Image (tube, rainbow, N blue to C red):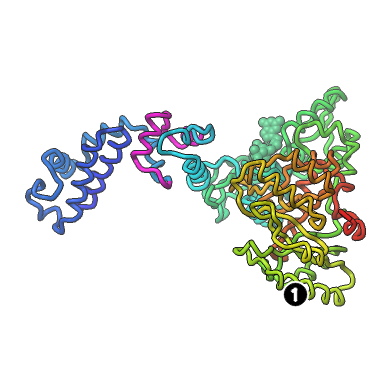
Amino acid sequence: MDKKAIIRHLETIATYMELRGDSAYRIAAYRKAANGIERDKRSVDEIEKWTALNGVGEKTTTVIEEFLQTGQTKLLTDLKKEVPVGLIPLLQLPGIGGEKLAKLHKELGIIDVQTLQRACEEGKVQALDGFGVKTEENLLAALKQAMGTRERHPFAYARPIAEHILQKLREFPAVQRAEVAGSFRRVQETVKDLDFIVETDEPEEVRDWIVNWEEIVGVIAKGTTKVSVRWMDEHELSIDVRLAEPAVFATTLHHFTGSKDHNVRMRQLAKQRGEKISEYGVTDDETNRVTTFSNEQAFYHHFHLPWFPPELRETGEEIDHSKRIHDVISIEDIRGDLHMHTAWSDGAHTIEEMIEACRRKEYEVMAITDHSRSLVIAGGLSIDNLLRQHEEIVKLRETYRDITILSGVEMDILADGALDYPDEVLRELDWIIGSIHSHFHQSKELITRRFQAACENPYVKMIAHPSGRKIGIRDGYHFDIENFLEIAHKTGTAVECNANPNRFDLRSDWLQKAVSKGVPIVINTDAHNQKELDNMTYGVSQAKKGWVPKTSVLNTWSVQQILQLKT
Ligand code: DGT
Ligand code: CA
Ligand code: CA
Ligand code: ZN
C-alpha cells in the first residue's frame, strides 16, 4: 500500500468531520497524523509501530490498520452517510474551507451548488458572521464560472461558437440552408443554449455527420428531426439542431426562433382566422389543407403582417405595433461610428488603419476617441499626446476626403465629477465622450453627480456605456437611469448604445425610456481593433430590442447635424 493513500484517507476523514461539525480537537488529530506520516521517510512496510510516529495516537492507529487491511474504514463510510455529498465539490471554491462550509451547512442548510447559489442570490451568505458582501460576490462568480452550473450564457460567450457551427453547417453538401434560431437569433443578452435550423433532403446523413463532429463531447438526443449535442467549451453548451425538409424550413425557423410569447400571439391570430400554426406550416381548420412558405416574409404576409426582425419577437405585444416596425433603426441607416480606439491608447490599429476599415464600411463619419490621461492602464493620452494626435488627424483629413474624421477623446469623469482635461483642451476637439471607468462602488447619488457634471460641460457631447455593466461579469455601478436621462435631456447630451455584446449598454428597456424622453442615442462599437467595428450590427440589434426609431439615432443624421449637438 502506498503511503499517500493513507495520508489522503486521513485527510478526507478530517474534512468530512469538519463538515459534520466535529470538535476542532478531533479533526486536528487526523490532520496531525497525516502530517506525521508524510514527514516520516520510511515506506509503509518499514514502519513497525505507527504510534511511534509524530502525531499518530492509539485511535488513529486503529483506523490506519483497518485501512491497510480492507482499503476502507467504517469511520469514513459512516461520515459519508452523514455529510451531504453535494457539499464536497464546494470545497474547491476559492476562500471556502471545511470550517466555513460547515457553517454554511449548519446555519443556512446549504447541501450543494444549487442551495449555495440560491443563498448567495438571496443575500443570506453576506449576513453570516465571517462572510461579507465581497465573499458572497466571489462565491457567486466562482459558482457561475468554474463549476459549470451556469444556466445562461452571455451572448458574447455563445457568439463565436454559434458562428463556427453556422459556417460548418452551411458548408456541408447535404445542407441547403442553415440559420441560427432561438434566443441567440433574437439577440438576447444571455442564452440558455444554441438552436439551429437546417434545410436538407437528407436528414439522416446530416444527423450522422453532426454526432461525429470532433468538437462535441456528448450526444443528448438523436432523432429524425432533431439532434442535441454538447459542445466542447468549458460549459458544454448544448446545441439543438432541427432538421427540416425544404417546404417546412420557413415555419420551422419561425417556430424555433420564438419567443414563446410571440408564437402564442401568432397562434391566437391564426385561430381567429380558422387556422392553426405549427412548425410544419399553417393548417386550415375546415379543409385541413396545409400551406407552407418559402421564407418568413411570406409566412408573415399570409397574416397581413410585415416581417418582424427577430430582435422584436419578445412579449407578443409587438404584433399590435406592427405599423411602427418600419420606423425602427436598421443597419442600413447607420452613417458612422463615433467611438473607437487606436494604438495611441489601448487599441490595436493605427488611426489610418481604422479610417481604412470605416471607409470599407462606406461610413460618412467616424470619430477617433482614445482614452484620457487618468486611465493609465489603458494608455490614456497626456495633453501633449492628445494634441499631437489631433494634429495628425487634421493632416489625415487631407488624404481621406470621402469620410469626415472627427477628432475626439473618451474622457474619464473622475471620482469627484471633475473632467480629465481642462476646457481649453476640450475646445480644440470635435467629439468629446464622457465615461466612468473608476470608483464603481460610489453611491447612486455620487455617480449621478459625476454624470451631471460631465453633461453640464458644453464640450461633452455623449456619455459612453452609461451603466458600466459587463454581462455575466459585473453589474456596473448603482445608477438612477431616470435621473440620468433627465440630465442628458436637459443638457442635450447624447447617450451611447454600446454595440459590444459584452456590454449591450444601455439595456433595451432603458433605451425605450431614452427615446420617450427625447434623448439622442448613438450606437457605437467602442472598437479596439478593425474587426470590432463589425459589432455595429449587434448594437443595432440592441437598439431594435428597445424599439429605437432611426430618427432618435444620432449617427444616422448628417455630419452637420451631428456637429450641431449642444451648440
Ligand atoms: P433560451 O434557450 O432559454 O435562451 O431561449 P429560447 O427562446 O431559445 O428557448 P428554447 O431554446 O427553449 O426554444 C427555442 C424556441 O422554440 C422558443 O423561443 C419557442 C420555441 N419552443 C420551444 N419549445 C417550445 C414549447 O414547448 N412551446 C412553445 N410554444 N414554443 C416552444
Ligand atoms: Ca435556445
Ligand atoms: Ca433549445
Ligand atoms: Zn471606449
Residue at the disc numbered 1: 388
Q: Position of residue 117 (x, y in %)?
A: 50, 36
Q: Nearer the viewer, residue 83 or 507?
A: 507
State the count of labels. 1
Q: For this view, does 303 lie left or right of residue 9?
A: right
Q: Nearer the viewer, residue 196 or 332?
A: 332
Could you classify mark 1 by the number of other residues whose Cα lies within 10 Å: few (under 14), some (14-19), or many (20 or more)?
A: few
**On screen, 371 above or below 165?**
below
Q: Which residues are magenta?
A: 94-118
Identified at 15% across, 59% down, the residue is 41
Tell me, yes or no, if residue 70 can be seen here.
yes
Q: Position of residue 35 (x, y in %)?
A: 21, 50
Identified at 17% across, 51% down, the residue is 36
Q: For this view, does 183 lie left or right of residue 217?
A: right
Amino acid identity at mark 1: Arg
Tell me, yes or no, if residue 166 can be seen here.
no
Which quadrant of the figure contains the C terminus?
bottom right
**Quarter residue 335 falls in:** bottom right
Magenta includes 103?
Answer: yes
Per the picture, the main secondary structure of the magenta-coloured stretch is: helix
Q: Nearer the viewer, residue 418 or 74?
A: 418
Q: For this view, does 265 lie left or right of residue 500?
A: right
Magenta includes 15?
Answer: no
| Secondary element at tag 1 | helix
Identified at 52% across, 45% down, the residue is 141
Q: Position of residue 499 (x, y in %)?
A: 73, 53
